[in-house]
Image (tube, rainbow, N blue to C red):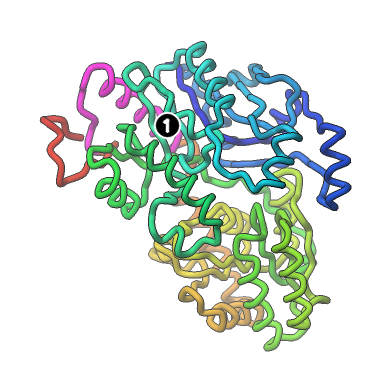
Amino acid sequence: MKVLWICHFSNPQVREKLSLSVNIIEVLTRKLLKKPQKQWNDYAAWITNGIEEFEKFNEIELHVISPHNGIKKRIESFKLNGIFYHFFKPDEDSIIKKMRRYIFKIIESDYEGNRKVVSSLIESINPDVIHMYGAENPYYSISALDIDLTKYPLMVSLQTLMSDSAFLENCAIDNRSYNFRSSIEQEIVKRIDYIGSSVQKYRQVIWSSFNPKAIFFKTYLAIEEKVDIINMDKKYDFVFFAASIKKHADIAVEVFALANKRIPGLTLNIIGGTPEPFTGELKARINELGIANCVFFSGMLPTHQDVLKQIQLSRFAILPLKVVDGVPCTIREAMFAGIPIVSAITWSTPDLNVNRQSLLLSKQGDYEGMAYNMVRLVQSPELAFRLRSNALITAQEKWNNNSSMIQLIEVYKAIIMNHKHDIEILNELCVKNPNVDYAGQSC
C-alpha cells in the first residue's frame, strides 16, 4: 500500500538531509528591523512520532510532502529509514514576498506555486490513499482543492476547526486572517468524504453547516510523547511553554503574579517563540506586577528534545487554556515528563481526571482559582507526588503511538475499499451522520 501524507513538520533528522541557508538580504533586513535571525526549529512532533512508527511497517510505502523554508531547490526529495520525503520551498519563502507581506499587510494568497508542486508530486507518487494533516493552514492545505477525488481517496485529520464559532470567540486572531483561513478550511471539508476528528462538536458543525455526508474517523495523531525523565536539580518553580508564548503566556503571568503574592519568591520559566509586539507588552506588564526578578525567558529552543529537557528544570507547570483548546501537546508533554500541572477546564481536559486526578483544573477565567492551585502544589508535596504518578498512568492509558498507527493503517485499507469498490466501512472504524440516508451505505 502506497500512502501519502501532506503536512508541515521539521525535525533534526530531516534538516540534516536538507540544504538549508538564509538569504544574505534577509539577514541584513532582520538586523535593520531589529528582528531575531532565522533559526530552524522542530515543528509538529506528532508527525515525526507517526513517521517513526511507519518505519516499522514493511508493507507500507510512506511518502511525506511538506513545505520547508530555507531549502535551496524548489523540491528536495530523499529516502531515510525507508520513508520517502518530498520537501518543497514554499511561495512565501522569498525575501521580496516577505517584504511585500510586511509592508502591505498581505494575508490572502492562492499559493499557486505551492499547489503546482504538490499536484505534480501527487501525480508522480500515484498513492493509493492521501492523508492530509490539518485543514487550517492554507499554505499547504489549499492543495486539497486540486486533488482529483475520483482518482485519489483523501482523508483530512483536523488539528482544530477554525469554522467552529468558539474558535473566533476565544482566540486572538486578525479578522482578515481568520476569514481567509476559515474559508479555505470550509472549501476543503465541503468537498471531501473522509475526515479525521475525535471531537463530537466538530462533527456536528461540519454535518450541519458544510458536509452532511462526511464520514468521520478518529483524528489519528501520534501524540504519545517520548520523554526521557531526567533526575536533575530544579531551577524554577513553574514553567509555561508553547510554540509561541502569544498563546496564553499573558494569562500564565497574571496567575503567577497572584500566586507570588501568597508565596513571595516563586519563579516562572517561560519557553517559546517571542513575537512582537506581544513580548514587549508582556514584559512591560511583568514590570508593572513587580515580578520581573521572578520571571525568566528561555525563548524558542531549536529541538523538541531541548524543550523536553528545559521543562524538567521546573517543579510544576502552569498551562492556561481557552475553551477551544483540547488537550494540547504541552499538557501531554508535562504529563509524560512527570511535571504536575495547573490548567483550565476545556471541552476535553476533564476527561483526564475521570479515572484518577491527574491535573488541577479551574474554570475558564478563574485566575484566583488557578493561583490557589499553584499554591496547593507548592505547599503539598503529597499532592504533587500523587498528581505526578496519576498523570503518567493516565497518559500511558490514553496515548500509544504504535497502536494508533496500526489502527490508522486499517482505516486506510477501509477507505481504499470504500472508494474503489463502494464497500461499506465497519462500525468500529468510523462515525456517520445519524440523520442522513447514505443510500444503503453504512459504517
User: Along the line of sight, which residue is nearer the eye, 121 or 309?
Assistant: 121
Magenta-drawn stretch, dominant element (helix, strand or loop): helix
Quadrant where the N terminus sits is top left
> How far across and how far down the image is residue 48, in percent?
59, 35
Q: Position of residue 429 (x, y in %)?
A: 29, 36
The quadrant of the picture occupied by the C terminus is top left
Tell me which corner region of the image, top left, top right, bottom left or bottom right, holds residue 354: bottom left
The foreground one among 16 and 275 is 275
User: Vertically, is 324 above or below 156?
Assistant: below
Q: Is residue 23 left or right of residue 403?
A: right
Q: Position of residue 74 (x, y in %)?
A: 68, 20
Q: Secondary structure at mark 1?
A: helix
Amino acid on which disc 1 is placed: Ile
Q: Residue at x 38, y 54 (%)?
A: 164
The stretch of residues the image draws in magenta is 403-427
With respect to residue 357, does 308 lie above or below? above
Kindly identify which residue carries mark 1. Answer: 406
Residue 197 lies left or right of residue 308; in this view the side is left
Residue lying farthest front? 104
Residue depicted at 59% across the width and 19% down the height? 84
Q: Nearer the viewer, residue 428 or 163?
A: 163
